[in-house]
Amino acid sequence: MSSIATLGDSIEDYEVYEFLGKGGFAEVYRARSRLNGLQVAIKMVDRSQEKTCPDLKRRVQQEVKIHSRLKHPSVLELYNYFENKRYVYLVLEFCAGGTLQGYLDARDGTLSEPEARHLLHQIVDGLLYLHSHAIMHRDLSPANLLLTSDLHVKIGDFGLATRLSHPAERHTTLCGTPNYISPEVAARGPHGLEADVWGVGVLLHLVLTGKPPGVSGLPGSSGSKCLSQDAVALLAGLLQRSARLVGIQVPLPGCCRPLGRTVAEGPPTSAAFERNAPTAVFPARQCKAPEASELSGGTSEALQHVSSAPRSPAG
């Protein structure tokens, strides 16, 4: 039996160690399975916060519904999820390297261009995977990018993620991390997958110059670090304010593929998502992936006590 199959499905099955970080309604701790010794991270969503955030139930359901189906080397893995009267628990892959933000802080805030290229390639690879399944992350920031001990990047925190139902679908919700949201999102304007690409551009600007782009949104508007022409051209392409991704070029050799095809071709249909979605992340006994009917509005079995109301699409 695989290690994932014997992790445990209650908090009593884990030894919980030090605090790793927190978000608006959850805290994350390092833990170890008492059943097989695997080291994990456990995100604990405080259900008492439902009093101040009536939408919390739906948001947790949607996070689990999306994250439990993902399987990619550049996406943080969700191993299991369960609940008790106080918390909803998400058992996640543990990344010993911490967050990209912590890594930058320990290195005076910037990386060399080869290092940035290495990280960006992995981030874009993970983002292409998400976009190929019509998933918009909506919160790409250094705090939500985790690093393994060998500096492999994992996209994490799907608390604001949503899945588009058709290529032309647009959202107007103002959400994300300040300094990393696109101009369209900040203006509460219609936006789609291209909002994530703006986030990639901001991340690249951050790791190369030590700060997010200035008001103009153009490379060179902040910081005095000298960048190569290739890096400047890449930033200019990623940080454009286009409503579509078509036309974005990636001039750095071997860095990443253009993201334009994800919007040009349009997100796959619901049937295509079902056909391509991973179904064997771990045995159904341990963590049941949502059924097709649940993707269109049911309530997952493991979270049936969090909310009895059908899910509604995220704003």
Image (spheres, rainbow, N blue to C red):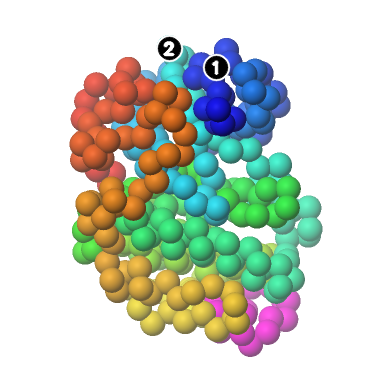
> Does the stretch in magenta take in 229?
yes
* Residue 260 picture location, percent across and down: 38, 74
Residue 67 visible somewhere in the drawing: yes
Residue at 55% over, 79% down: 234
Residue 26 visible somewhere in the drawing: no
Q: Amino acid at mark 1?
A: Ile
Q: Work out how far the residue at label 2 is from the one at label 1, CA to CA, in angstroms.
A: 12 Å
In the depicted structure, whether residue 230 falls above or below residue 280: below
Question: Counting other residues with Cα less than 10 Å from the Cα at mark 2, is it few (<14), some (14-19), or many (20 or more)?
Answer: few
Left/right of residue 150 with respect to residue 238 in the rendered view: right
In the depicted structure, whether residue 172 falls above or below residue 245: above
* Residue 130 picture location, percent across and down: 41, 56
Quadrant where the image shows the N terminus: top right
* Residue 263 picture location, percent across and down: 31, 69
Q: Amino acid at mark 2?
A: Lys
**Label 2 belongs to which residue?**
85
> Does the stretch in magenta take in 228?
yes
Residue at 47% over, 82% down: 249
**Label 1 belongs to which residue?**
11
The local secondary structure at tag 1 comes to helix
